[in-house]
Image (tube, rainbow, N blue to C red):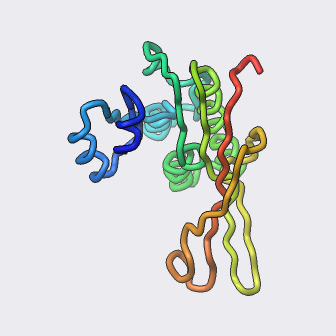
Amino acid sequence: MKKLASTFRNVLLIDLVHPREAVLMARELSNIRLLEHDLTGALAGLQRSLDTGAPLAVPSQPPDFLDDLQPDLTVSANTLSTLPLIPMERLWLTGRYTDSDLEDYARRLVEVHLAWLRALPGLRCLLTDLSWISAGRNETRAANPLHGTPLPPPERYWNWMAAPKPEAHPDRDVVHTVGGILLESDGH
């Protein structure tokens, strides 16, 4: 965060919940602002659907809470693959939705976030998980954390050992393939 503060005049960090360390550090840096916000715009509508039984809907447009900002650089870091996790868990726990319903919902959340990024001015950089791999001695499982949403090829990619055995599983390592992508605007 200190590197961001020394490189840019104004820095806005947006997350559903900021870690305590980030909050404390931001207090020391006058040009860092933290904003807690649901980047999907879906959680409020999701709760209404769960409470009332209304049809499940994903916002069709990107969030408009930053309409007045004109960023030179927007970085979506480690966000895209995690956006659907909380809503999908809430929906799954109801037992009312099929796996196909959940996958479709998650894919639409990812697509809305990408549309929002592409609509922003300035340079847009996406750092995201491209695949999740669970590798054991006799078995390897792979998952698409973007729920089939196509992306341009990454400028760079790397493997991150997210949870070596036995941290998450007694007999498997969890590896995330992460990519860095410069996004074109909606017009391209």
Position of the N terminus, as image quadrant, is top left
Establish if 136 lies above or below 32. below
The residue that appears at 67% across and 49% down in the rendered structure is 179
Q: Is residue 89 left or right of residue 103?
A: left
As drawn, is 13 to the left or to the right of 81?
Answer: left
Residue at x 72%, y 44% (from the top left corner): 155
Query: Which quadrant: the C terminus?
Result: top right
Which of 139/26 is in front? Answer: 26
Task: Tell me if I can see residue 134 in this picture.
Answer: yes
Residue 146's spot in the image, x, y percent?
Answer: 68, 47
**Tally of marks:** 0
Q: Is residue 164 left or right of residue 7?
A: right
Q: Nearer the viewer, residue 141 or 95?
A: 141
Relative to 38, is 25 above or below? below
Q: Is residue 52 visible?
A: no
Locate residue 87 relative to residue 152 in the image: left or right. left
Question: Which residue is rendered at x = 27% and y = 41% of the image?
Answer: 26
Residue nearest the viewer, comparing 56 with 11: 11
| Residue extending farthest top | 68
Residue 105: x and y in percent read 64, 40
Q: Quadrant of residue 48?
A: top left
Q: Position of residue 53 (x, y in %)?
A: 51, 36
Q: Position of residue 34 (x, y in %)?
A: 32, 35
Q: Residue furthest front?
A: 6
